Amino acid sequence: MLNTTSVTKFLLLGVTDIQELQPFLFVVFLTIYFISVAGNGAILMIVISDPRLHSPMYFFLGNLSCLDICYSTVTLPKMLQNFLSTHKAISFLGCISQLHFFHFLGGTEAMLLAVMAFDRFVAICKPLRYTVIMNPQLCTQMAITIWTIGFFHALLHSVMTSRLNFCGSNCIHHFFCDVKPLLKLACGNTELNQWLLSTVTGTIAMGSFFLTFLSYFYIITHLFFKTHSFGMLHKALSTCASHFMVVILFYATVLFTYSHPASGTSMDQDRIIAIMYTVVTPVLNPLIYTLRNKEVKGAFNRAIKR
């Protein structure tokens, strides 16, 4: 059934209503976007071009960098445009498209973090069987699977949201089109949409978080009982802790946002939390996953010397 809305476009009200802050925020978020794209782009190019990094860990890291570039690009360019423009409109089709790609990439990243944690679990806890378990065929299949699940998860939300009737205000109190803000503008019953958001998105986020937590739990337990060198134990635990901080930041904010009903949180609260997982996490990922990585640092140095 086609959408019967009388609304042909929406107005994105952005991060703040204070006009004086708009130029400052433009500079801040432009800088963040540049760092995110440059950092993740550099990692992606290094992983592709350096044969020494053609391993499962860096294959998934390359996927993460690609995801983060796209993830930032879905929301930040439109946000930056709106900071400098009085015309903050987005077409109905553009809004649904943004919603689709946001959930596609966000859902895929949630599952990819779980796969990366599993990869580290196998590498640390079962090192002798690592190359057998994490073979190229399995890695490719896992990557294709999570990208496919992410796409159809997003397609479900975009189709169901496009079928809603929007007959009132067209002002979205957010800096991008998402399901929750749109549900607040919809006329009629949105219980099914809300249930899908809480159940499907919640299951993907919670399931991925549980698998990630379980992998790190086994890694830490294994290190405590098997590693006799305090220096090696401290280094491994600090690396796991830095990875897990980003995971917590991403999953906690996503779960908080999508496990509550659309009417259960304030607009300002949703916008602040959304900044954490749409803007901050993509910038932190290249830093956290490469800061203590000698192989990536070496690959960067070799690339610079060429």
Image (cartoon, rainbow, N blue to C red):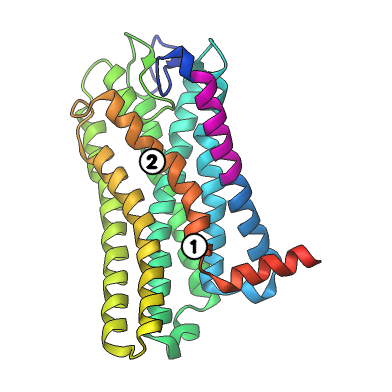
Q: Amino acid at mark 2?
A: Met
- Residue 16 covered by magenta stretch: no
The residue wearing badge 2 is: 276
- Residue 28 covered by magenta stretch: yes
The residue wearing badge 1 is: 289
Left or right of 257, for residue 30? right
Most prominent secondary structure in the magenta stretch? helix
* Extent of the magenta region: 22-35
**Residue 184 drawn above or below residue 45:** above
Identify the mark nearer the N-term, 1 or 2. Answer: 2
What percent of the width, then of the height, locates residue 31?
58, 37
**Residue 147 drawn above or below residue 189:** below
Q: Which residue is drawn at the image coordinates 33% and 91% (left, top)?
A: 228
What percent of the width, then of the height, locates residue 15?
41, 24
Res 101 visible: yes
Q: Amino acid at mark 1?
A: Tyr
Could you say which quadrant of the image residue 201 lies in? Answer: top left
Q: Which mark is residue 37?
A: none
Secondary structure, mark 2, is helix
Farthest residue in the front direction? Answer: 231
What percent of the width, then of the height, locates residue 245?
35, 57
Please state, as top left, top right, bottom left or bottom right, where the N terminus lies in the image.
top left
Secondary structure, mark 1, is helix
Res 4 visible: no
